[in-house]
Amino acid sequence: MIKVENLYHSYNNNEKFQAKNVSFEIKEGEVFGFLGPSGAGKSTVQNILTGLLPLQKGKVTVDGYDLKQVHNKRFNRIGVSFEQSNIYSKLTALENLKYYADLFDVPTRDPEELLKLVGLEGKGNDRAGSFSKGMKHRLTFARSMINNPKIWFLDEPTTGLDPAIAATIKDIIRSEKAKGTTSFLTTHNMYIADELCDRVAFIIDGEIKLIDTPKNLKQQYGEKLVEIEYVKEGEIYKETLKTVDDSDKEKIANIIKSYEIKTMHSKEATLEEIFIQVTGRGLI
Amino acid sequence: MMKKILRIFRKDATIARRDSMLIYIIAIPILLAVGIVFFAPGVTDSASTIALLESDTADHIEYMEDYVQVEIVDSMEELERRINKRDDVVGVVPIDQGYEIIIEGNEDEAYYETVKAMSAFYKIGATRENTTAEILDFGKTVPPLKTTLANALILMVIMLAGMIIALGIVEEKSDKTIKAMNVTPISQNTFIIGKGMLGGVVAMGSIIISLLIMGYNDINWLMLILIGLTSMILTFIVGFLQGLASKDVIEAAGGVKLIMLPIAAAIAAYEILADKWQWTMYWNPFYWAYRANDLILSKTADWGIVLISAALVTILSIAVYLIAIPKIRKGLS
């Protein structure tokens, strides 16, 4: 659905590139995470893919359209949820969605249904300007689905939302994936990337350092350890043991068999730890 | 494309209804037209008016009424008050041997000389029936001051159309919605026309209502609309440029007011400059618009001159558009 080859972009049209030799491919129905700290080049790449920035150098095809040419029709199959909410503050929530629905040439979703989906049921006739930051963000997110997009660009979709609403948004992304929607998720939140993405790309200083599935990355970079807390003769003991070492494996089995286990955790690496390990930089 | 242009227009109209500043912009020209009719005496009357005393002879009053508009006042004080108003009214009062002409001092000399001659004709008993002179009519049936004010009002409304567009763009910028528009199937051209439509419709509506209030019921409306629409191209461009360059509503409104300069220059040049210097304003689209409107409002325009004027306004405005469009496109990206 999306193919990027040797993409370069410079805001000042000089040799200082904000995107350098970026190449990747996203298959239909895949949720692809673009992970990197602020200023890494995530938004630059996403803005090129959505047509908000011109393609300077490289080859990019989105949904079969070569981005060297302008094809307004392609937006009928694309949805974009922006990090910063951008809705008409003097229009009501319903008026906002109905207006955007009328700009597309394809069948659109029921605005009321979308508002319900993002937890804004009953707020349809309230002006968007009176909404809280989180509500505006949800309305922007709902608007990105108005045209039943086949390719969905999500920029920090859960940032600033309370955990319950963030969980709802994640559920919506999962259900859209189940319908076969291809998603390009830009975030610096490794938890959401870990939860939702089929594959992630680590980008730093405009360059992709690594692309793989979260599972593979954890296996490759994570330490294979188990942390066990158990009670022995009234005292609490805590041990960290290797799951690949034979003597440690025996010890784990013995502890489980002989003592009362208080807690036991596998110590696989988080995506953030892997990111730091790979790039030498943090995600903030 | 038309459906989407109308959709953008409908959305902008909804927002405009909820914005008091836009409502003021719409109301200003209509209030001005009402003000002109009610507070500027004589603007809607004929230019040829004389004031006579109630005590004058019925024969003299009747004679004068055959040729000019006559206002009867009941005293000398009232007559002086009437003459001193801002329009050209000449007083004629009986004295021992005939009539005395009373003027404010700033009237058109030709006018009070005519009144003087009429008094002389009355004295010798000359009438229409016993004169052999033929009348040559230039066909100007509308008072010149009225035409000037109405014409200036039209250009002011056209400037306000640019302001409406600038305010709409500032609104889009503050809500950051231009970015969202750029990821829909509508093209920039559709967006630009759609955004311009509210300004155009409001301006044309205001112009028509204002002119009807001022009593212009029987002018050629098609000609007026054609000149109005073509002269709006330039204000649209200024509206877009200023809207994109401004951070807030006040800055945008202030910037658009700059367009008053070429408008004022056009009016001043057409009304004051000698014929041999008129060419200095040929570069200014508002000059051609003002000139064409002057003919339309005084009911002396023909389609030939209106079409030439409209073509000149369009060509000059398009030249500005070609220079400005890359900046507008960049601003909307």
Image (tube, grey):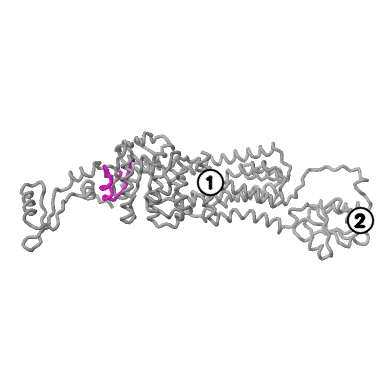
Image coords of residue A161 (percent x, y) = 34, 55
The amino acid type of the residue labelled 2 equals: Asp
- The residue depicted at 33 percent of the width and 47 percent of the height is A172
Chain of the residue under the numbered disc 1 shown in the image = B
Image coords of residue A276 (percent x, y) = 22, 49
Whichever of labels 1 and 2 marks the residue nearer the N terminus, that label is 1
Find the distance from the CA under tag 1 to the CA under tag 2.
63 Å
Element at badge 1?
A: helix
To which residue does mark 2 refer? Answer: B59
Image coords of residue B259 (percent x, y) = 58, 49
Relative horizontal placement of residue B324, taking residue A224 as reference (left or right): right
Looking at the rendered image, the quarter that the C terminus of chain B falls into is top left
Relative horizontal placement of residue A241, taking residue B67 as reference (left or right): left
Where, by quadrant of the figure, is residue A123 drawn? bottom left
| Residue B49 vs residue B121, the one in the foreground | B49
Image coords of residue B79 (percent x, y) = 82, 62
Report the mark closest to the observer, 1 or 2: 1
Q: Is residue B280 visible?
A: no
Element at badge 2?
A: helix
The span shown in magenta is: A181-206
Vertical arrangement, residue B292 with respect to residue B40, above or below: above
Label 1 environment density (alpha carbons within 10 Å; few <14, some 14–19, many ≥20): many
Vertical arrangement, residue A60 with respect to residue B180, above or below: above
The amino acid type of the residue labelled 1 equals: Phe
To which residue does mark 1 refer? Answer: B9
